[in-house]
Image (spheres, rainbow, N blue to C red):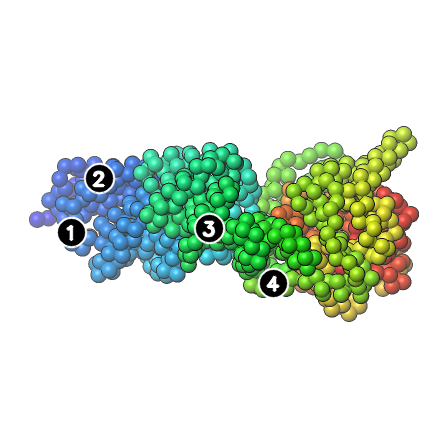
């Protein structure tokens, strides 16, 4: 019997509402989707029995299935399952696969992962036979998510590839974006952070155009990736910007996952109170959704925070063990393993070593995450240490660090390479503690080197500049120039400052997507370092801390010993006071009484530093040249100003391995000299003019000729490069520390674009010798960027420097270089006449 036009119009309208509802669901807006789906059902007469036409029954079935998913997404799990259960009378045989897809989706959303994968497995062949390609693409995408939860990366990627292909053929643009999203999550699980971020970037482009509600969900994944790379502060910024976006979307599962991730970030930065609050909030939301699997993960995160904060130490072992059993029963083996490790830590904290060992006897799963594997190495090392078994401590700590080094070698970004050091800090500390207990100099040296500046061992990668990044850097230069002009006029341009910060974030995020070579250099051993020290007539002082006490490892031709030094808080405060005094003295001439008072204060701080850092070393130091390996705040010490070191060549290096590698590197054939004078620096042009007499064949860039591109072109592979320019150390954005040139700033970021590193760079003004020191004594800043790129020697200032004084010091320095003096010797001699010049020789000396 033919249908009436009115009936056909009703069906067409209901189909349109179904399409809108699905579109809203796929865009991450379940509340909006549910409204359209309910409207479609009302048009078809639901909840009354479906009409006589098969088309009405099938459409009612599909509307109910989609509405069920929307209800569960909004946290109404019972109602969602009830709606789906009510479709039994409507279903035709060819729709059995669709029903299994819908049930699997609901099971996934409520954390019943084992049931979900069975439902998807059963759905796939039915959908293939029925020719339901749209439903098949969605089933494969959701099954990939289940595989990912279980740590099964390969089958997940296979499902994602097939889903993406089907989605492209069918024009399902949001589904394609979700495939990229899923691929990124899988790559993150496999430890490929750059690859994950590239995939997330592709997903973001698709979501921005077609599913903006999914952008907040994607931000959670990006935050997890940054957390996995040790960039917890950046992860917090990404997630804090996204969290308010969940309001009004109705995506309660995703919102709870975001809150849980925020708890994990807070735990990583040591904010245990915030971690506890976020984890409790996430757990409540999961429980309201009846999602017991995720609620258990949130409970584990809260327990970790409470234990780290010193609370629940007595009960933590039992609670963690119970959580491990529950998580394993829910199919979350990785999280169960993390709970077992927490139980072991709790036992160790109470001296119950055998019970701790019992908790880690189980072999780790093949799909364990990197952080879980590293924690297992830490716990086993601590157990061995508690038993006095130092060889086993070294074995477990070294195995974890080897795994971390392999992970780091796949990062091309210096930002990520230095950030990931946080993941190995406890392993390095366990090994160093055991080495100090053993007391053998070679063993202590080995673990000191394990614990610092590991990013320098990764092979340098030159990132390719995509058009968007090139444009962003160009805009940043222009805006920075505008902002600098405003500062010189005594005003601030907040609009330009905000845009600069936004561009810096964009450029950094793009750099994170660069993959590494997978290779890293070997670490130096004490014997080879001592041989090189003897050949150079040099001694090494490598500083480290034990609690709040500073120690030094002293090595030379005839000595290798550990010396206890002074108090770290006292030294840290003294460095800050000294830097402040030097900054004041670098500016305009002060009234004589004030000038004298500041100089007296500076001399006092130099005395404090000498007492705490050098006085105990006097019997062993002799008069040899020195290589200093600083730790933490000691990277900011102007060593040549200390009375014991006046006139002595001192070279500062991030590690003994870095120093030895620079010494052994083949000297490049003689190359050109570059002399650059930046703008707004009173004596810069005079300084370059005087130096040009020493290097008559050198290239000079002065005035309008001193542009960024000209400087980069000339800097690439040159022998000596001297910059007399204003510099700015950006404490909160070190990759954008800069030198001011005629058309804008030369950024630390630009250094990584060089094809060949300059041999020797002198940064003759301001304070671009400052560094930010991350966990593991990883350095970031303009000077560090040059050293990472392969520059053998950098001379720069760790505090502001008087421009007039710089001219005389630099002229004397370059004359000594021209006579054949080594950089460290040339600097020691040149600064003798200027007792408060905070220049430091970094690198090989």
Disc nearer the start of the sequence (4/3): 3
**In the displayed structure image, the side of residue 735 where residue 178 appears, left or right:** left
Residue 398, image x, y percentages: 57, 58
Residue 668, image x, y percentages: 75, 68
**Residue receiving disc 1:** 92
Mark 3–mark 1 distance (CA, rounded to whole Å): 57 Å
- Residue 665's place in the image compared with 281, above or below, is below
Mark linked to residue 243: none
Residue 409, image x, y percentages: 57, 60
SS under mark 3: helix
Residue 219, image x, y percentages: 47, 44
Mark 1–mark 4 distance (CA, rounded to whole Å): 60 Å
**In the displayed structure image, the side of residue 496 where residue 91 appears, left or right:** left
Of labels 2 and 4, the one closer to you: 4
**Residue receiving disc 2:** 82
Q: Quadrant of residue 623?
A: bottom right
Q: Is residue 64 visible?
A: no
Of labels 3 and 1, the one closer to you: 3
Disc nearer the start of the sequence (3/2): 2
Mark linked to residue 520: 4
SS under mark 2: helix
Q: Are marks 1 and 2 in contact (CB under 8 Å)?
A: no
Question: Which of 788 and 431 lies nearest the eye of the viewer?
Answer: 431
**Numbered marks: total:** 4
Mark 2–mark 4 distance (CA, rounded to whole Å): 57 Å
**Residue receiving disc 3:** 357
SS under mark 1: loop
């Amino acid at each position: 019997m033919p249908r009436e036009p009115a009936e056909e119009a009703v069906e067409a309208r209901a189909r349109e509402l179904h399409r809108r509802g699905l579109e809203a669901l796929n865009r991450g807006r379940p509340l909006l989707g549910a409204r359209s789906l309910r409207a479609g059902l009302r048009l078809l007469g639901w909840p009354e029995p479906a009409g006589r036409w098969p088309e009405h029954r099938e459409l009612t079935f599909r509307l109910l299935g989609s509405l069920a998913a929307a209800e569960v997404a909004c946290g109404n799990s019972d109602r969602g399952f009830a709606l789906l259960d009510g479709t039994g009378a409507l279903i035709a045989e060819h729709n059995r696969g669709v029903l299994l897809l819908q049930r699997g989706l609901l099971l996934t959303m409520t954390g019943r992962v084992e049931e979900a994968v069975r439902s998807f497995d059963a759905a796939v062949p039915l959908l293939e036979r029925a020719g339901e390609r749209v439903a098949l693409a969605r089933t494969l995408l959701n099954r990939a998510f289940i595989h990912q939860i279980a740590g099964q990366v390969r089958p997940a990627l296979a499902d994602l590839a097939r889903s993406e292909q089907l989605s492209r053929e069918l024009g399902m643009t949001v589904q394609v974006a979700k495939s990229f999203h899923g691929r990124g999550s899988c790559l993150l699980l496999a430890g490929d952070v750059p690859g994950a971020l590239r995939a997330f970037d592709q997903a973001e482009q698709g979501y921005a155009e077609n599913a903006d509600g999914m952008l907040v969900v994607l931000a959670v994944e990006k935050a997890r990736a940054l957390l996995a790379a040790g960039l917890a502060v950046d992860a917090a910024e990404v997630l804090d910007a996204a969290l308010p976006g969940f309001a009004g979307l109705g995506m309660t599962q995703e919102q709870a996952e975001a809150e849980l991730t925020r708890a994990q970030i807070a735990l990583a930065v040591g904010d245990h109170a915030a971690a506890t609050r976020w984890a409790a909030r996430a757990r409540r939301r999961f429980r309201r959704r009846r999602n017991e699997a995720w609620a258990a993960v949130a409970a584990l995160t809260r327990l970790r925070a409470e234990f780290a904060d010193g609370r629940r130490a007595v009960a933590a072992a039992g609670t963690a063990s119970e959580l491990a059993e529950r998580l394993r029963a829910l199919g979350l083996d990785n999280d169960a393993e993390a709970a077992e490790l927490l139980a072991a830590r709790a036992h160790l904290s109470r001296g119950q070593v055998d019970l701790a060992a019992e908790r880690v006897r189980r072999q780790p799963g093949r799909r364990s995450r990197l952080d879980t594997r590293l924690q297992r190495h830490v716990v086993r090392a601590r157990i061995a240490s508690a038993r006095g078994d130092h060889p086993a401590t070294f074995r477990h700590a070294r195995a974890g660090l080897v795994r971390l080094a392999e992970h780091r070698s796949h990062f091309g970004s210096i930002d990520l390479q230095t950030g990931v050091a946080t993941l190995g800090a406890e392993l390095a500390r366990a090994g160093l503690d055991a080495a100090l207990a053993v007391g053998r100099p070679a063993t202590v040296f080995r673990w000191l080197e394990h614990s610092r500046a590991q990013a320098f061992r990764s092979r340098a990668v030159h990132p390719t500049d995509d058009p968007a990044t090139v444009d962003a850097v160009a805009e940043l230069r222009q805006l920075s120039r505008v902002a600098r002009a405003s500062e010189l006029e005594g005003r601030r341009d907040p609009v330009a400052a905000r845009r600069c910060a936004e561009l810096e974030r964009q450029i950094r995020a793009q750099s994170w997507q660069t993959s590494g070579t997978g290779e890293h250099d070997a670490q130096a051993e004490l014997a080879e370092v001592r041989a090189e020290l003897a050949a150079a007539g040099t001694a090494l002082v490598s500083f480290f801390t034990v609690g709040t006490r500073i120690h030094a490892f002293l090595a030379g031709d005839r000595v290798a010993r550990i010396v206890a030094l002074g108090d770290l808080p006292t030294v840290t405060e003294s460095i800050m006071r000294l830097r402040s005094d030097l900054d004041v003295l670098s500016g305009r001439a002060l009234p004589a009484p004030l000038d004298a008072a500041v100089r007296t204060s500076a001399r006092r701080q130099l005395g404090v530093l000498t007492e705490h850092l050098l006085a105990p070393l006097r019997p062993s130091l002799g008069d040899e040249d020195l290589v200093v390996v600083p730790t933490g705040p000691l990277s900011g010490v102007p060593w040549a100003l200390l009375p014991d070191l006046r006139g002595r060549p001192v070279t500062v290096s991030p590690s003994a391995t870095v120093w030895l590698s620079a010494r052994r590197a083949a000297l490049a054939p003689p190359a050109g000299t570059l002399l650059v004078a930046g703008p707004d620096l009173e004596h810069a042009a005079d300084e370059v003019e005087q130096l040009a007499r020493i290097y008559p064949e050198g290239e000079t860039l002065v005035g309008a000729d001193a542009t960024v591109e000209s400087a980069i072109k000339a800097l690439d592979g040159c022998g000596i490069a001297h910059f007399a320019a204003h510099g700015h150390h950006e404490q909160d954005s070190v990759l954008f520390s800069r030198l001011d040139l005629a058309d804008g700033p030369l950024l630390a970021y630009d250094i990584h674009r060089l094809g060949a590193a300059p041999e020797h760079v002198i940064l003759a003004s301001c304070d671009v010798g400052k560094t930010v020191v991350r966990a593991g004594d990883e350095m970031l800043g303009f000077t560090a960027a040059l050293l990472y790129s392969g520059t053998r020697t950098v001379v720069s200032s760790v505090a502001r420097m008087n421009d007039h004084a710089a001219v005389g010091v630099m002229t004397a320095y370059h004359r000594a270089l021209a006579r054949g003096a080594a950089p460290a010797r040339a600097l020691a001699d040149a600064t003798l006449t200027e007792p408060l010049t905070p220049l430091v020789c970094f690198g090989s000396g």
